[in-house]
Image (cartoon, grey):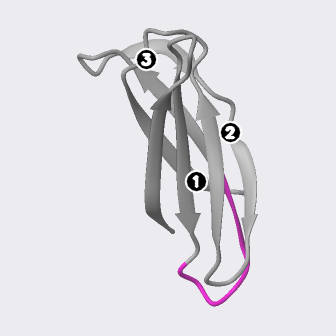
Amino acid sequence: ITCSGLQERVNEDGRLEVVANIRNRENRRIQVQVNCVFKDDQGFSTGDETAFQTVTIGRRDTEAVRFTAANDKAKKYTLRVREAK
């Protein structure tokens, strides 16, 4: 799995929105789970962590996954990807 692109924007209400393009480098279809931990400008968690989203990605395909912070405190983020079981 790779992240082939990230898009960030701040909504009108001040909340950070992130779109990640997750690319499957395998020659087989896979399922992964992706979530986002939003952080303040110093890199500390704001306590806003999304639920894991299960994404099925075809072989060599790319899927976009979108996350929006719950409040306007988020300035940074960490995306986490794990294999779905």
Whichever of callouts 2 and 3 sits on the residue coming sooner in the sequence is 2
> Would residue 53 be counted in the magenta stretch?
no
Q: CA distance from mark 2 to mark 3?
A: 18 Å
Q: Which residues are magenta?
A: 25-33
Nearer the N terminus, badge 1 or badge 2?
2
Marks 2 and 3: CB-CB under 8 Å? no
Position above or below: 29 against 7: below
Q: Are marks 1 and 2 in contact (CB under 8 Å)?
A: yes
Q: Is residue 5 above or below residue 46?
A: below
Report whether residue 85 is seen.
no
Residue type marked 3 = Ala
Q: Tell which of 65 and 15 is nearer to you.
A: 15
Q: Secondary structure at mark 3?
A: loop
Question: What kind of element bears circle 1?
Answer: strand
Q: State the residue position of label 2.
A: 52
- Please tell me in which quadrant of the rendered image residue 85 appears: bottom right
Residue 51 circle label? none
Tell me whether circle 3 and circle 1 mark residues in contact (CB < 8 Å).
no
Q: Is residue 32 magenta?
A: yes
**Residue 48 vs residue 4: left or right?**
right
The answer to whether residue 21 is left or right of residue 65 is left
Out of 16 and 55, give the one closest to the viewer.
16
Q: Which residue is mark 3?
A: 74
| Identity of the residue furthest to the front in this view | 12
